[in-house]
C-alpha cells in the first residue's frame, strides 16, 4: 500500500515536473523519503517511539536518526513488517540495484517462510502485533560495504532492545 502511494506521488510529481527542470531522480528520492516516517522522540524518558507498532527503543546516537516504514501487506493486510532505516540511507539510492538498501533492518512476526534478505539476526519479546524476528539487509550490494555493515549492526543492536507499550 505504501509503495502504491509512493508510485502515485511520483506520477503526480512527474506530471508537474514536465514543465520544470526537476529530475526524475529527485522525484524518486522524494517519493522514497515520503514513505518513511520520523519516530516520536521523548527526551525526558530517553525513548524513541514507533506508535503504529506500539514499541519503543532506547534513545541514543543511532536511534535519534532512525526512520521507519510500518507496512501492512498480504491479501488481508494483516501481515505487518516494520522496516527500520537511518536518515543517511533513506532516499539516497543511486542505482536500481540499491533500491532495497533503505530497508536496513526488518522486524517481522514469526512465520514459516523466511524473508529473502537473510537469516534471523535477533529476536525480541513479541510486540502486541506479534513482531518478533529481526532481519538485516545484506551489505554486499549497498555502496560502501564497511560503512553500511557498521550502520546496519548498530540498528540491529538498537532494535534488539525494543519493548512494547
Image (cartoon, rainbow, N blue to C red):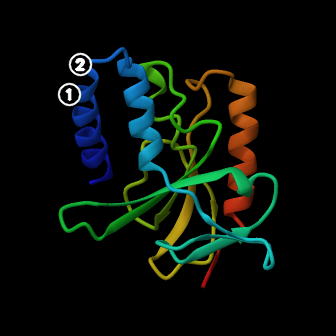
For image coordinates 60% across by 25% down, the residue present is: 140
- Distance from disc 2 to disc 1, alpha carbons, whole Å, reads 6 Å
Query: Is the C-beta separation of discs 2 and 1 under 8 Å?
Result: yes
Please tell me which residue is depicted at 54% across the width and 29% down the height of the picture: 92
Q: Can you see residue 99?
A: yes
Residue shown at 68%/32% (left/top)?
148
Q: Label 2: which residue?
A: 18
Q: Position of residue 47 (x, y in %)?
A: 73, 72
| Residue at (65, 73) in percent of width and height | 56
Q: Quadrant of residue 46 in the image?
A: bottom right
Residues 16 and 153: in front is 16
> In the image shown, does 27 or 139 lie closer to the viewer?
27
Left or right: where 64 falls relative to 114: right
The one nearer the camera, 130 or 52, is 52
Kindly identify which residue carries mark 1: 15
Please provide percent x and percent y for residue 142: 58, 26
Across and down, in percent, residue 165 comes to 60, 85
Q: Secondary structure at mark 1?
A: helix
Amino acid at each position: 500500500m505504501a509503495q502504491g502511494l509512493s508510485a502515485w506521488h511520483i506520477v503526480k510529481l512527474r506530471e508537474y515536473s514536465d514543465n520544470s527542470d526537476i529530475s526524475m531522480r529527485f522525484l524518486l528520492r522524494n517519493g522514497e523519503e515520503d514513505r518513511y516516517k520520523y519516530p516520536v522522540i521523548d527526551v525526558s524518558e530517553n525513548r524513541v517511539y514507533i506508535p503504529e507498532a506500539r514499541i519503543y527503543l532506547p534513545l541514543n546516537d543511532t536511534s535519534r536518526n532512525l526512520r521507519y516504514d510500518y507496512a501492512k501487506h498480504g491479501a488481508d493486510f494483516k501481515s505487518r513488517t516494520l522496516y527500520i532505516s537511518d536518515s543517511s540511507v533513506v532516499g539516497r539510492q543511486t542505482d536500481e540495484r540499491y533500491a532495497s538498501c533503505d530497508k536496513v533492518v526488518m522486524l517481522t512476526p514469526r512465520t514459516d517462510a523466511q524473508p529473502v534478505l537473510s537469516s534471523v539476526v535477533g529476536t525480541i519479546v513479541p510486540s502486541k502485533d506479534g513482531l518478533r524476528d529481526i532481519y538485516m539487509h545484506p551489505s554486499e550490494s549497498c555502496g560502501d560495504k564497511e560503512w553500511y555493515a557498521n550502520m546496519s549492526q548498530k540498528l540491529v543492536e538498537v532494535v534488539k532492545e525494543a519493548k512494547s507499550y
